[in-house]
Image (spheres, coloured by chain):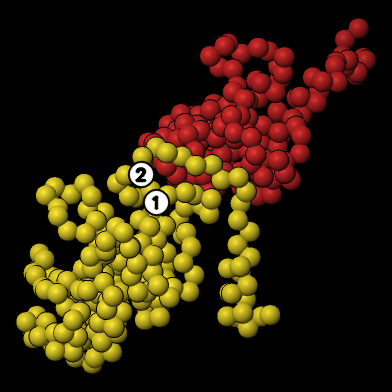
Amino acid sequence: METAILVEKLKARHPDAVLGSTDRYGTLEIQVDRNSIDRLVETLRADSELSFNMLVDLVSIDYSAYPGWTGDRFGLAYLLKSLALGHRLQLKVAVPEEEPVVPTLSHLFANANWLEREAFDQMGIRFTRHPNLKRLLNHHEFVGHPLRKDYPITRRQWLSANESLMDEMEVRLKEKGYE
Amino acid sequence: MGVETFPVLTTRRDAVIAWGQKNSLWPMPFGTACCAIEFMGVVSSVFDLARFGAELVRFSPRQADLLLVAGTVTFKQAPILKQIYEQMCEPKWVISMGVCASAGGFYNTYCTVQGIDQIIPVDVYISGCPPRPEAILQAVLKLQDKIDNPKAVPPAQFKAKEPSFDY
């Protein structure tokens, strides 16, 4: 689909959500309002002419050391791909430092569950209505978010006791039909 | 009187036990990274760790007496390593294989333990990223020397550190 038509279609469907669009190295980038990202992605996924059925990656960005940056401190980039139609799209969301809260996509894409947990762990961005928003890479006693630019890279934190992970196991057992 | 006519050899009990221990080290690889792949090369036929009696690789700490920490140890992994070390029966020895396990390597970051000697006592360190198989053979030979001479005092710069983090 032509990118201009795609943007027009999205604007007609969600006039408040689409803030702008640019061409980012040959890929269409759409700036999206933070609070309507889930509704917009739902449309992108459900519409048969768009059918963005794959979330390739979710990237969180800290702009605090970015040269000449005046916008919000954090950003999220959602990379979407349509397996059926072969086109790609990038969605950019600005996230303010005072309230780093974004709606979850975990009900639309299964892999968004862990990608959002990683963004929460490393950058401290919280996702509303996420089923299991806890640290993914760092241990559970870790304080702070290490990929933020103001986290000292060599500040190390000892873990006193290993996590049993039984809460994760119980969910898996229930999924597989064991009680 | 020669050995032929009187087939008995007198020695010390410590020496016999040490001889047995050093020639039948049962290693347990705690492999977390690429060093563990190099360890596979050492135990297989070309370099053949079996020539030094350490071929019986165990994957249970309760059956092993040599813990071979091969790879990067993160802070999330540190309590696990400590627990595995404590599960091993005495006597036990530790070889820190590669620069990541010995000193954190180039992972000078928030997530990597800067040397496993902060958690558990280490007998022999191996440098390299990853070490050559010959270096691992050398480390096993060094450890055998150490088992043979338990009272030998190493030079000050080679003294084993006390673990600095206490679980």
Residue at the top extreme?
Answer: B1
Q: Residues within 10 Å of mark 1 (few under 14, many from 20)?
A: some
Residue A151, numbered label: 2
Residue B87 relative to residue A171: left or right? right
- Looking at the picture, which amino acid does disc 1 mark? His
Residue A145, numbered label: 1
Q: Which chain is red?
A: B
Identify the subunit bearing mark 1: A
Kindly indicate whether the residue at mark 1 contacts the one at mark 2 (C-beta within 8 angstroms).
yes
- Looking at the picture, which amino acid does disc 2 mark? Tyr
Residue at mark 2 to residue at mark 1: CA–CA distance: 7 Å
Please name whichever residue, A25 or B31, is drawn nearer the observer in this view of the structure.
Answer: A25
Q: Earlier in the sequence, mark 2 or mark 1?
A: 1
Q: Locate the N terminus of chain A and report the quarter of the image it occupies.
A: bottom left
Name the residue: 25% across, 87% down: A43
Residue A11 relative to residue B103: left or right? left
Instruction: Tell me whether marks 2 and 1 sit on the same chain.
Output: yes
Residue A41 relative to residue B160: left or right? left
Q: Position of residue B26 (x, y in %)?
A: 68, 39
Residue B86, numbered label: none
Name the residue: 48% across, 63% down: A134
